[in-house]
Amino acid sequence: MLQQIQDALLPIVQMINAYLSDYILVGLLIAVGLWFSIKTRFVQIRCFGEGMRKVFGNLTLSGGRHDSGMSSFQALATAIAAQVGTGNIVGASGAILTGGPGAIFWMWIIAFFGMATIYSEAVLAQETRIKDKDGSIQGGPVYYITRAFQGGFGKFLAGFFSIAIILALGFFGCMVQSNSIGSTFNTAFGVPSWVVGVVLVVICAVIFLGGVQRLAAVTEKVVPVMAALFVLGGLVVLVLRIQYIPATVAMIFRYAFQPQAILGGGFGAALKIALSQGAKRGLFSNEAGMGSTPHAHALANVSCPHDQGVVAMIGVFIDTFVVLTLNALVIISTLYAEGGPLAAGYTGAVTEVIGKANLAQTAFGSVFGESLGAKFVAVCLFFFAFSTILGWNLFGKINMTYLFGKKSTVVYTLIALAFIFLGTLMSNDLVWELSDMFNNLMVIPNAIGLFALTGLVVKSVK
């Protein structure tokens, strides 16, 4: 019965996603990024060094307990925890398989302009955040949307965004993460997915019930460690495959502008696939313009909104230009390079063996050995997806509080834990498509709010 429902839902959700991503999402993301790049005089270039100094100049894995909110680095770690998830491993794999290596180039473009977008989101989240009577801080797109539109239209947009993010991240998004953890652990260690689901639910419940302070204490320690582990493993692969690196980089640029050479079909159709895959998976990876990470940046205790804006930009840089790019280089240099199983494209019998869920494991396994490669990716993916679940749960909880008050958060947490467990059991494709659909829908009200408050962003950047 459950399988029949999934089979019926999948083509419907895929059709909605195709329309949103191909005709709305790409244009809207690039438009927002271009708009704020121009309006801020390319803040992502001018203030990049400032952002790096603020992040790494006072780096600490123990930011201390705050009466309310978080330290700037804790907020960044929470944002990166949400950004660096399965989108960097499974999402990038899916983009490369469907759109070819050139999809990575379009991910870079989206991320470059997205740095200006996320600067604006963080600034507005700081500018419009509120402090409750008990001293706790609340902030995010719903607060700057209702600042921009103070009538019924603003309430409608904010409500639409809140419902979309609760479903996209708090529920279906966490299913994506737990699904990926369950499937990779099953492949690597032979652990039944439901067992992984039970363990995840227990760990997450302890952290969720500890509130913002416990979550911040966990993410500020987990994020640097998980990033360092993955980067180290990726660099080992690239050193051993160094003779293929020039060809790998060349493929990314070549297939960005000649995608039909590896995807087949006509030039226009192939370019559309490569670009839309890059944009869609790029959004899911770095979340710039989606309206998720502003919830974390709103909680940062900083002297002025601009300070957290430049820190937020570094989150996108680390997510896309470091972690995701490293994963892409590993995949392309091992599987698409000369003699690789995908050198002629994703066609033929190889499609029955390699999919987006095991592509990274196959790539690392070609150097580390099949067993060790699968285990390495499974461990990295656990950290990535686990930390993302923590961040996304917080973002959904903030919007649940906005809609229904603080008493609703217990019910929200119980439902979220149920979805985390179900994610380890459900169809990978349907979970991804549902998450994509609500991610896409979140962008629309968030972008409208950003455009409306351009003046506030420009004032901050000056």
Image (cartoon, rainbow, N blue to C red):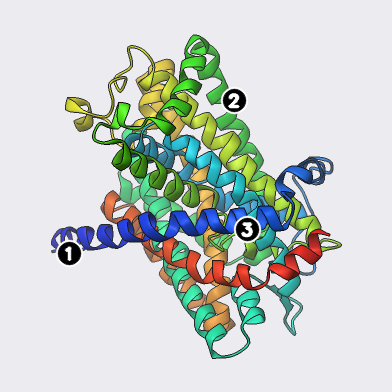
Q: Amino acid at mark 1?
A: Ile
Assess disc 1: are there few (<14), some (14-19) or many (≥20) residues with their C-alpha within 10 Å of its C-alpha: few
Q: Amino acid at mark 3?
A: Trp
Residue 55 in the image: state x and y as whole percent: 77, 45
The circle on residue 35 is 3
**Is 357 placed left or right of 42 in the picture?**
left
Local secondary structure at mark 3: helix
Q: Quadrant of the N terminus?
A: bottom left
Q: Can residue 420 be seen from the camera position used here? A: no
Disc 3 or disc 2, which is closer to the eye?
3
Local secondary structure at mark 2: helix
Q: Quadrant of the C terminus?
A: bottom right
Q: Which residue has dot 1 on it?
A: 5
Residue 96 in the image: state x and y as whole percent: 38, 35
Nearer-N-terminus badge (3/2): 3
Q: Can residue 287 be seen from the camera position used here? A: yes
The circle on residue 366 is none
**Cα distance in 3D space between marks 3 and 2:** 36 Å
